[in-house]
């Protein structure tokens, strides 16, 4: 059947997969996207109304060139339709010597990014909702803000469809194998063949590609602010911060009438993907509310929403962008570890580069699979 043969297949049409689908279609590929859930959906790692984007990057300074390209591509995507990126500035804060503060400052210095260094008192004077410990230091970088993840996915998918891509939702992939002319992908509805395969299945990449990716349950809260004017986008930068209770991140009010925030590695719950508890519990609210009451007391009103999502953690919490070690026609995008969505636009471009050219001009050496051992030799 002619509709069973494609140039490329993308498995997983969330944030990364939708971008890869678009970039492949943009380059003239006859491409199929396969998604086991809806498009978009709230069952993986690419939802939640808003997602942070920031140019200062404490996790690793080498991400900054990728982010510069990501910003370009998000703006390009916006030009084709609706607004997707809102600038608020970003705050990366913690005590002196903490990874978040020191790493963010280092990335600004390494890449000549405009920024300010503020102490806790200066930060509160500028943004009165913040009530951080007195020894806190913060990097304020003006390019930070947030993306609208569901709308970003829809934008990538619709543009790919306009370029001729086929997209199938609610079609679960059962497995894949090398074929004489590339790859064969089997789903609940049949089998498809293509010259190349891009795997972007999020927390399911361990089972699908044998990668060292662990699913973790994450919960986000939206609380009604007592002083809503202090939590508006123009007065409340997105944040990443370290306090004695852990590492947290947050957003201004947008889309849902509440101050949104979460704790990295929320309750440290690795999960079986066949039995994820997706309903938030009282314990989830308690740990989040305690944080808000202490550091953002004017944001700690009644619950507006609680949502569960999944982190897909790699062992070092850095991405995996590479070709499969045993199958050069298979490209892997995985391990985004709770900080990947902002990169979707550029990761889609990189995955298309790897699929079509076997290489990319962007520096992804620090994200290659070879840093882990042993490597997956065959499909599990």
Image (tube, grey):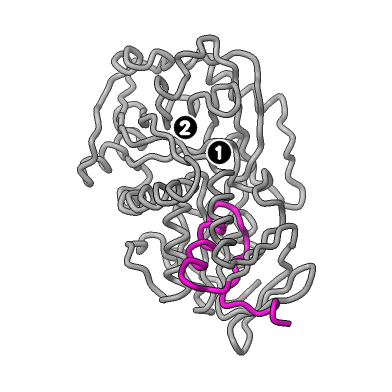
Residue pictured at 44% horizontal, 71% vertical: 354
In the figure, 137 relative to 147: above or below? above
Residue pictured at 58% horizontal, 83% vertical: 182
Q: Dot 2: what SS?
A: strand
Q: Which mark is residue 265?
A: 1
Residue 21 painted magenta: yes
Please provide the residue range marked out in magenta: 1-30
Q: What percent of the width, then of the height, locates residue 297?
A: 51, 12
For the N terminus, give its image quadrant: bottom right
Q: Are marks 1 and 2 in contact (CB under 8 Å)?
A: yes
Residue 316, visible in the rendered structure? no
Q: What percent of the width, then of the height, locates residue 113?
A: 24, 40
Nearer-the-camera pick, 173 or 21: 21
Could you say which quadrant of the image residue 167 lies in?
Answer: bottom right
Residue 344 painted magenta: no
Q: Which mark is residue 247?
A: 2
Residue pictured at 59% horizontal, 37% vertical: 48
For the C terminus, give its image quadrant: bottom right
Q: Dot 1: what SS?
A: loop
Nearer-the-camera pick, 93 or 376: 93
Q: Residue furthest right?
A: 189
Residue 300, visible in the rendered structure? yes
Q: What percent of the width, then of the height, locates residue 288?
A: 58, 24
In the figure, 193 relative to 255: above or below? below
Q: Which mark is residue 293?
A: none
Nearer-the-camera pick, 379 or 238: 238
Question: Is the residue marked by circle 1 packed among few (<14), some (14-19), or many (20+) residues within 10 Å?
Answer: some
Residue pictured at 64% horizontal, 46% vertical: 270
Could you say which quadrant of the image residue 243 lies in?
Answer: top left
Could you say which quadrant of the image residue 366 lies in?
Answer: bottom left
In the figure, 265 relative to 152: above or below? above
Question: Is the residue marked by circle 2 packed among few (<14), some (14-19), or many (20+) residues within 10 Å?
Answer: some
């Amino acid at each position: 059947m002619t509709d069973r043969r494609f140039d490329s297949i993308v498995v997983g049409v969330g944030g990364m997969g939708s971008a890869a689908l678009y970039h492949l279609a943009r380059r003239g590929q006859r491409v199929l996207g396969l998604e086991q859930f809806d498009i978009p959906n709230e069952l993986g790692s690419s939802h939640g109304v808003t997602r942070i984007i920031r140019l200062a990057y404490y996790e690793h300074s080498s991400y900054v060139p990728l982010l510069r390209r990501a910003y370009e591509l998000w703006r390009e995507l916006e030009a084709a339709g609706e607004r997707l990126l809102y600038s608020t500035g970003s705050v990366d804060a913690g005590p002196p010597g903490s990874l978040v503060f020191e790493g963010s400052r280092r990335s600004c210095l390494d890449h000549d990014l405009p920024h300010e260094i503020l102490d806790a008192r200066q930060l509160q004077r500028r943004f009165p909702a913040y009530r951080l410990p007195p020894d806190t230091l913060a990097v304020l970088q003006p390019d930070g803000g947030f993306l609208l993840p569901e709308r970003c996915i829809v934008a990538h998918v619709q543009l790919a469809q306009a370029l001729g891509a086929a997209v199938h939702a609610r079609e679960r992939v059962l497995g894949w194998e090398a074929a004489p002319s590339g790859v064969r992908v089997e789903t609940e509805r049949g089998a498809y063949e293509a010259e190349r395969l891009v795997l972007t299945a999020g927390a399911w990449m361990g089972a699908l590609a044998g990668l060292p990716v662990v699913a973790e349950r994450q919960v986000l809260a939206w609380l009604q602010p007592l002083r809503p004017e202090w939590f508006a986008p123009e007065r409340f930068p997105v944040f990443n911060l370290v306090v004695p209770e852990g590492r947290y991140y947050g957003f201004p009010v947008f889309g849902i009438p509440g101050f949104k925030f979460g704790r990295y590695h929320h309750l440290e719950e690795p999960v079986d993907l066949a039995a994820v508890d997706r309903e938030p519990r009282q314990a989830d609210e308690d740990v989040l509310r305690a944080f808000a009451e202490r550091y953002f007391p004017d944001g700690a009103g009644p619950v507006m929403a609680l949502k569960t999502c999944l982190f897909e953690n790699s062992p070092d919490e850095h991405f995996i962008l590479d070709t499969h070690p045993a199958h050069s026609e298979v490209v892997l995008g995985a391990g985004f570890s709770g900080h990947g969505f902002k990169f979707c636009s550029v990761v889609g471009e990189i995955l298309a580069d790897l699929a079509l050219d076997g290489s990319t001009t962007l520096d992804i050496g620090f994200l290659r699979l070879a840093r882990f051992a042993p490597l997956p030799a065959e499909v599990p």
